[in-house]
Image (tube, rainbow, N blue to C red):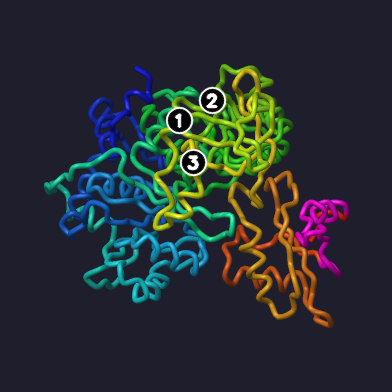
Amino acid sequence: MALIERTSGMTVAAALRTRATSDPTASFLLHGDEPLTFAQIDHEADALAAAWAGLGFEAGDRVALLLPPCPEFVVSLFAAAKVGAVVVPLNPRLAIPELQYMLRHSEAVCAVTVEQDRDIDFLQLFEELMPQLPELQYLVTVGDEDLWYDDRIFQFEDLLSSGQGRDFAIPEMDPTAMFALMYTSGTSGKPKGVELSHENLLSAAAATAAVIGLEPSDRIVGISALFHVYGLASGLLGSLLAGATLVLQDDESAGSTLDAVERHQATVHFGIPTLFVSELALLERRARELKSLRLAVVAGAPVSDELVTRMSEHLGVTVVTGYSLTETASTVSASSPSDSAEKRRFTVGRPIAGTEVRIVDTDGSERELPVESVGEIRVRGPGVMLGYYRQPRQTADAFDAHGYFRTGDLGLVDEEGYLHLVGRTKDVIIRSGFNVYPREVEARIEAHPAVHEVAAVGIPDELLGEVICACVVPVEGAIVTGQEIVEWCRETLADEKAPDLVRFFDALPRSDTGQVRRVELSRSVQSEGQSA
């Protein structure tokens, strides 16, 4: 029976229990040098679920996970699944206004957070946030500090201990019910909560694991963001369904990832193009023992055929690529190790099992185009989201009359059914795997008293995929520097949204209808070089 068929009608909690029963002693996670088996994770998730049930958690309650890749993230995710809760995975690097918005919008009743990460004191942060978030009743902290708590704050290990051996009522769970609320930015840059069901995530994970050929013997590195839909579905849940071992890294840098390959004899390497470019640069300076690797999976940002060729040569692996979206629970299409080298270099593979792709004319006619024609990519299948949380109009606009999700991306399907990405109809910059919407950056810069107008554009970059350039027209007579603009952005925007470059113009080029000519701006910046 195919992997995707075995997950049909299954919940995330049931998927873990099935694997823990059939393969209890096999390693699920490696954190440092400590292996954690499927049975151990299931046992700890039961304990945490019992503790949460004792606190009154109910089906549908939101649990925010603000953690780096660590066993506590995984245990919390499955514990939430066992009590019927909805997980809200959040990036620990979020700017405070974004974090506050998402916690409030999701109506999270509990947040699980690391005490300290990258010089951020999350305990102090939540002490300031909790009075402003009336729905947030509990905080669970991961760390070793001896701290004072009130009756709403618990250490993770204490909760785990309190739930050991306790029974709890297991609610009736519908596989089509929402399990994860994943935040992404819309075309305006405003966060949207993408509702994903158990079925959405498991079907995408199973189909991805099948097409790239994950095996129980595989050890996987490079999954550095479990809060991201690809890391959560294709990475974590894909490993679970295939019975493979996932290596959790405290440090996601290129050097540490290569260290993890050598130390753990990893066989499969996931990653965004930025990571692989950095690794290749390190390998030019020092050779590594990477013979255990058999497969590299590239997703999260556009990848050049030149990079695929270099990876094949210097890592000694088969390279496959994928096309993924938050709204489709990760993978839409992926190439397979059995595909020809040409298809793996120049396409993002065929649609995964159960997923349908159609190409539609961009002239507004909604006419489906024949093969080899460029148009907007539309997607329908078991991974496609339930909708945008609390945004019915946005949800309705996201689907066409045939029930296909409007991706906003341009592509074509060739005669053999392979999908080729051509470009994007949405104004989005993909920087180091993160979607950055120009309007969000521009709104912040426009608030600067020395700025008359601004346009943010993406500039191709070998390391980051694209970098953000703020093209600024200053107020007449104003004196302002590029560094001041960058620092102004960092006060309220996440680091990955702050401009990498700032260029000053007397006026922005515009079309006859007044639209900023972003392509012209991008070419202008590229022609003068990218140095800051």
Identify the disc placed on residue 37. Answer: none
Mark 2 or mark 3: name the one nearer the start of the chain.
3
Q: Nearer the viewer, residue 408 or 57?
A: 408
Q: Seen in the image, is 227 located left or right of residue 450? A: left
Q: Are marks 2 and 1 in contact (CB under 8 Å)?
A: yes
**Where is residue 237 drawn, in percent x and y?**
39, 36
Instruction: Report which quarter residue 32 is drawn in.
Output: top left
Specify the segment rendered in magenta: 504-527
Residue bearing the label numbered 1:
219
Indicate the secondary structure of the residue bearing disc 1: strand
Residue bearing the label numbered 3:
230
Residue bearing the label numbered 2:
292
What amino acid does circle 2 point to?
Ser
What amino acid does circle 1 point to?
Arg
* Above-or-below relation of 477 to 441: below
Q: Residues within 10 Å of mark 3 (few under 14, many from 20)?
A: many
Q: Seen in the image, is 1 located left or right of residue 531? A: left
Q: Nearer the viewer, residue 387 or 231?
A: 387
Mark 2 or mark 1: name the one nearer the start of the chain.
1
Q: Residue furthest bottom?
A: 477
